[in-house]
Amino acid sequence: MATKYPTKVDPIRQLQSNPASAPVRAMVDIYYDDFGPDVINQLLFPDGVTQAARDKFSLGLFPPAVPGAKPGPETSYMVAELLPQGVPEEGPGDVVAFAKWVLYREPRPEEEWNALRMLSEGSNPDVYNWFMGAMHQVAIEQAKALPLWDLNILVTMPRHQRLGTGSALIRQGNELADGLGIPSYLEASLYGYPAYRRLGYQDLVVKDFEITKTWGVVKLENWD
C-alpha cells in the first residue's frame, strides 16, 4: 500500500516494507550517510564504518525467523520514495528515507529490558557501553512499564533533509499509534529535537553526555 505526501520538492510515496520487497542496500546506505558524520559515530567508529558493520546492520533490519523462538515485538518499516517529475505515480522512485517502528502491545518483561543492544562490528566497546548503556538506562526509567510505538530509526539522505520527508514518515507512524491508542516514543539528538517538538512530541528527560569532557575534542577523520 502506498500513500503520497506533499513535501517542499517532488511528491514522496510512503510504502510499508517487508523482507521480500525492501530496498535493503539503499536503506543501509541512507542510514550510514545520515548518521555517519555525527560525533557519536566518530567516536564509535574512529576508523570509519567497516563493511562487516554494514553487513551486520543489514541482517539486523530483517533478521531471519528462529524456529521455536518466542514471538517478538511487531516491526514496521516505512520507506519514502522520491517521485521525480514525469515519473508515473505507479512507477519506480528513488528511496530517500525510511523509518523503523517497533510495536510493544504490552509492557515488556524484565529480561527483555535487561538485554542491551548488540555491539556493532568494528566499534569502540568503551564508547558503545558508555553511550548505549546510558540511553538504555533512560529508556528503562521512562518507558519500561508502558506499551509503546517506538520510533527505533528515522533516517533521510542528507541532500533530501529539511524538505519534509522525515516528517511525512513520522506523521504516518503517529496516525497508526493514535489508531492503536498507544503512546509513541523516541530518542532524539539535538539535531532532530526541534522537528520532533514541532510534530507534538514532549520531553520526558534530557540527557547531557558531556562528550568533550569525557572524550575530548572529536576530529572528523576517516569519514567521506
Image (spheres, rainbow, N blue to C red):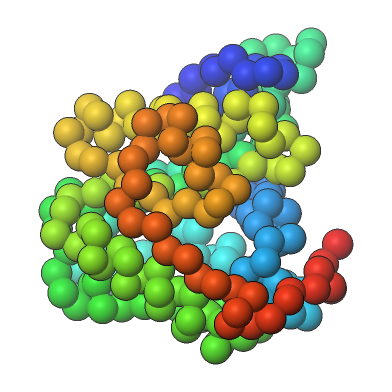
On screen, residue 169 above or below 38: above
**Quadrant of the rendered structure where residue 172 is?**
top left
Image side of residue 130 versus residue 186, left or right: right
In the image, 61 versus 206, the foreground residue is 206
Residue at 60% in and 26% down: 164
Is any atom of residue 25 visible in this view? no
Q: Position of residue 32 (x, y in %)?
A: 68, 59
On screen, residue 178 above or below 27: above
In the image, 47 versus 130, the foreground residue is 130
Q: Position of residue 112 (x, y in %)?
A: 23, 72
In the image, 199 versus 16, the foreground residue is 199
Which residue is farthest bottom?
A: 126
Image side of residue 204 versus residue 199, left or right: left
Quadrant including the N terminus: top left
**Quadrant of the rendered structure where residue 87 is?**
top right
Image side of residue 151 versus residue 86, left or right: left
On screen, residue 133 above or below 162: below
Residue at 40% in and 57% down: 206
Image side of residue 197 versus residue 224, left or right: left
Q: Position of residue 66 (x, y in %)?
A: 33, 71
In the image, 149 versus 61, the foreground residue is 149
Q: How many marks?
A: 0
Is any atom of residue 112 visible in this view? yes
Residue at 34% in and 47% down: 203
On screen, residue 137 above or below 197: below
Quadrant including the C terminus: bottom right
Residue at 51% in and 27% down: 168
Which residue is farthest front?
A: 213
